[in-house]
Image (cartoon, coloured by chain):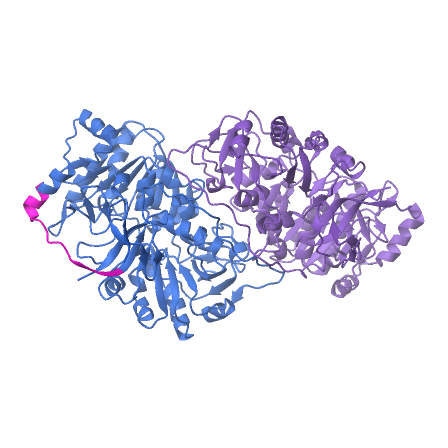
Chain colours: A purple, B blue
């Protein structure tokens, strides 16, 4: 088998069965696109046309679903999503097989998919994340029989726009929808907030089905996806479990270690000079990430600093910063909690953006490229600063690619917050199990036990030195940790590839092999 | 020369030099699209990319403008537009020739175009309207030497989306723009309101240049055209003359005859049963059209009727109806006055829509197809109810196609308001000089001297009869008028075709021949 070695030193077959030819990752901006945006069949409409259909079954029939098609879903309903399962169950009943599933991500709500994979209804999966039982069944037992394709949020938008992912039918969960298929995600009992992922699906899918539990009169007044893209509207009792869709405001961690890391991260950011008037910022919702905002807020208040925008993945805490005037604007693809969801509906400066506007490297601008500061978390980080957020050291898939590679490539300063160990397994390793975010786009690691600056950022090292902030090399920190934990044994992998990790530009940055 | 006769009985060459093969008009919904939406070259962006260029010249050079390209403009700055002339002058200085100009419309501000046509800089024109000196130079002296292509607002969006009009460079006048090219039309000293036409250009042009006199910090908060489509941003002192861009609220006519026609029209609409809860409505800004709203408002108030949406072309008077709660929503491609422009910025239920969402028959829904009532005006109407709004009886081009064919085809009830004569020239004729809106999409004519119902709408005739509203046949009304005016002499036309009038679906409904 012919193999190639990409720019993060991963040896990858040049052709992967079930995926195709591999374009090797060559650096964050080394691979330019060629060709044109995907074409879509022209449609037509007449006065009096109705898009309302009585059931998901009828929508599927009218879309002429058939074996081998590519269908798409989005994960804004998170663990509360009913839509993907309702549609897949109906498809299974119809006897349709061999579908290629394009999800923006998959959550534990989607575990019924396991049966649809085993029965051959679903034979291809494209997603950003995979966790729990589905992940286990795929990475351990290879029930799919071919690799799952993992893409970044920006990379998903890019692949759809470029026609690499040609969607036949897009299913869109719409918390508010009118009879002609104008939709938004922020009104109604199943509101989830920003609707960034299916905006792209709607534009490039041949058929678009809106599934709603809140049919409103024409015209919907806040339109996130316009009717010009919608073919059918199905009204169901409920598109999701409100309790699982959007919980209250995401809480900032109270874990002392996470708070310590966050405080250190804030100090590093301040020392770097990045926290100044007009700066922009993104932080994830988990662990230390969000807590960094709290410490930054104090500094911004004291020094009367007003930021420009925060992007995300918005949380209630970011909404608080917006409403208190610390930032001008939130740019949001996906609201992480109920407070953020409500803010999309009410705050004119809380803007939705498509995943293409968020992070697609192959349009004319994306928000990720305008970021000053990005705070990431990591499952593993290696001495080259490569980050893994998708697989565990056991080789099990248990996370997501998300927007990390997009924002790390885009932000002027990318800072990783992580504890040095989890359950006595060290985070820092000589070589991450899988590379998700390449080290050359990562600038600083902040842990509870030390701060490390990527040697390619001498300017940052100098700024931290000048501020009297102690740093270590990442090799030193690794040794310190392994002194406590011991050097973990490496998992052994076979040849079977159960996942392909695409970088945002469509090159392959790594593959996930089945553990032995 | 091979000719064909289309469904409105116009004899048209089957091939027109400078235009191409003719697809004959075959009925309002008889011609379905084939093929796919236009492809656009993929782009890419990097962090730190700047889109700001120092001058229009630099933008033209970076866009690699060259002979024979297609370039587009929009007419939201109306008579105050500086942008088209600034760009064309620079292009002329560069020695570029043989450009195909795609304007959403042309106004008297654009008369310097005459020189660019004469000098061969512009050798093709696509527009919705043409008036004044340019129109005279083209229709009388044929300075272009080939036909101008006239399209409806929906037809322009359709042609661009279908790739029939492939735009190389779109120039967008942006009253508010940030350095990455996020734009809106409703903020800044040159605000014009809704930005419906260039929304389509931005999406489908290979290169997009934003020209602004109001550069704001990134990110602009109200985004009508997102940066994902913008290549370059040019800052100039002024994009237009504010006094000519948007005057105060459009006044309702005080002309007693126009008011009489409007009152009659309102009675007819009420008698038809169309004015009921949830009805939707569009009216032009001129003459009697807007006055109809005033009479309808009284009826709605008395009968506690609340409408759904008004679309347009919004005026200050429609904003008043919105703010007073007579309608829920304004859907707007182009704000006709300053009050409407300001409303786009402040009223969350005054929505902008692209010209495709407004009226393109070849997407999955357009607003025009959701209309209950449309009020049109006319330069001429014939006994088949065909309407001319583009040329005078002398054959001179002096008007626009606009959204009339789109909304007439879409609305359940299309009512024409017109005086029976202008300067002693009768409006009703045996055969309009040019067909712009086909009679089969027109239902009622209301004049100061009589009301006529299209015989294909027996239901409406019956409703009016039941309400005791007197009607005449259009032939009778014509005779009444000609009894006063005499039968006008017909203009004689030669063979030279100076204009092609496309129906909204891309078929040819008529051609404009040069008068002898």
Residue visible at 80% across and 51% down in the picture: A381
Image-based side of A187 in relation to A2, left or right: left
Residue B92 visible, this angle: yes
* Rendering coords of residue A6 (x, y %): 76, 58
Q: How many marks?
A: 0
* Rendering coords of residue B284 (x, y %): 29, 45
Give the residues in magenta: B480-497
* Rendering coords of residue A19 (x, y %): 70, 47
Q: Which quadrant of the rendered structure holds the C terminus of chain B? A: bottom left
Residue B323 visible, this angle: no
Res B448 quadrant in image:
top left
* Residue A279 in the image: above or below residue A389: below
Q: Which quadrant of the rendered structure holds the N terminus of chain B? A: bottom left
Q: Does the magenta run of residues contain B489? A: yes
Most foreground residue, A182 or A244: A182
Image-based side of A186 in relation to A118, left or right: left
Most foreground residue, B276 or B153: B153
* Residue A477 in the image: above or below residue A395: below
Q: Does the magenta run of residues contain B167? A: no
* Rendering coords of residue A511 (x, y %): 77, 48
Most foreground residue, A409 or A267: A409
Residue visible at 60% across and 27% down in the picture: A94
* Residue B76 in the image: above or below residue A60: below
């Amino acid at each position: 088998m012919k193999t190639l070695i990409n720019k993060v030193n991963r040896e990858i077959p040049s052709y992967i069965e079930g995926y195709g030819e591999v374009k090797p990752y060559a650096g964050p901006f080394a691979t330019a696109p060629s060709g044109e945006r995907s074409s879509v069949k022209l449609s037509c409409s007449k006065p009096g046309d109705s898009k309302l259909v009585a059931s998901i079954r009828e929508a599927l029939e009218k879309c002429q679903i058939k074996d081998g098609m590519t269908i798409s879903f989005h994960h804004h309903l998170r663990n509360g999503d009913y839509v993907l399962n309702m549609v897949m169950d109906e498809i299974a009943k119809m006897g349709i097989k061999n579908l290629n599933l394009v999800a923006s991500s998959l959550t534990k709500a989607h575990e019924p998919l396991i049966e649809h994979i085993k029965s051959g209804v679903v034979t291809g999966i494209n997603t950003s994340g995979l966790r729990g039982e589905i992940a286990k069944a795929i990475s351990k037992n290879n029930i799919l029989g071919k690799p799952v394709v993992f893409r970044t949020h920006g990379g998903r938008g890019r692949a759809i726009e470029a026609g690499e992912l040609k969607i036949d039918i897009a299913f869109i969960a719409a918390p508010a929808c009118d009879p002609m298929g104008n939709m938004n995600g922020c009104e109604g009992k199943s509101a989830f907030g920003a609707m960034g992922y299916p905006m792209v699906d709607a534009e490039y899918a041949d058929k678009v089905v809106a599934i709603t539990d809140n049919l409103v009169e024409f015209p919907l007044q806040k339109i996130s996806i316009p009717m010009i893209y919608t073919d059918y509207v199905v009204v169901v009792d409920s598109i999701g479990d409100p309790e699982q869709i959007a919980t209250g405001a995401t809480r900032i961690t109270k874990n002392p270690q996470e708070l310590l890391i966050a405080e250190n991260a804030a100090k590093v950011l301040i020392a770097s000079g990045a926290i100044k008037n007009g700066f922009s910022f993104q932080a994830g919702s988990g662990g230390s990430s969000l807590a960094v905002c709290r410490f930054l807020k104090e500094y911004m208040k004291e020094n009367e600093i007003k930021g420009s925008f925060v992007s995300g993945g918005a949380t209630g805490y970011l909404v608080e910063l917006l409403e208190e005037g610390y930032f001008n604007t939130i740019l949001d693809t996906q609201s992480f909690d109920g407070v953020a969801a409500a803010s999309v509906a009410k705050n004119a400066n809380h803007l939705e953006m498509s995943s293409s506007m968020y992070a697609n490297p192959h349009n004319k601008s994306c928000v990720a490229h305008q970021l000053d500061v990005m705070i990431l978390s990591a499952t593993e980080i290696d001495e080259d600063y490569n980050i893994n957020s998708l697989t565990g050291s056991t080789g099990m898939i248990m996370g997501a690619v998300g927007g990390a590679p997009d924002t790390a490539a885009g932000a002027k300063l990318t800072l990783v917050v992580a504890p040095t160990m989890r359950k006595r397994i060290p985070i820092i390793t000589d070589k991450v199990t899988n590379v998700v975010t390449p080290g050359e786009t990562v600038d600083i690691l902040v842990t509870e036990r030390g701060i490390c600056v990527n040697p390619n950022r001498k300017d940052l090292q100098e700024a931290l030195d000048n501020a009297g902030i102690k740093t270590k090399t990442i090799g030193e920190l690794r040794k310190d940790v392994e002194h406590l934990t011991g050097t973990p044994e490496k998992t052994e992998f076979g040849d079977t590839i159960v996942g392909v990790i695409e970088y945002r530009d469509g090159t392959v940055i790594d593959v996930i092999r089945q553990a032995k």
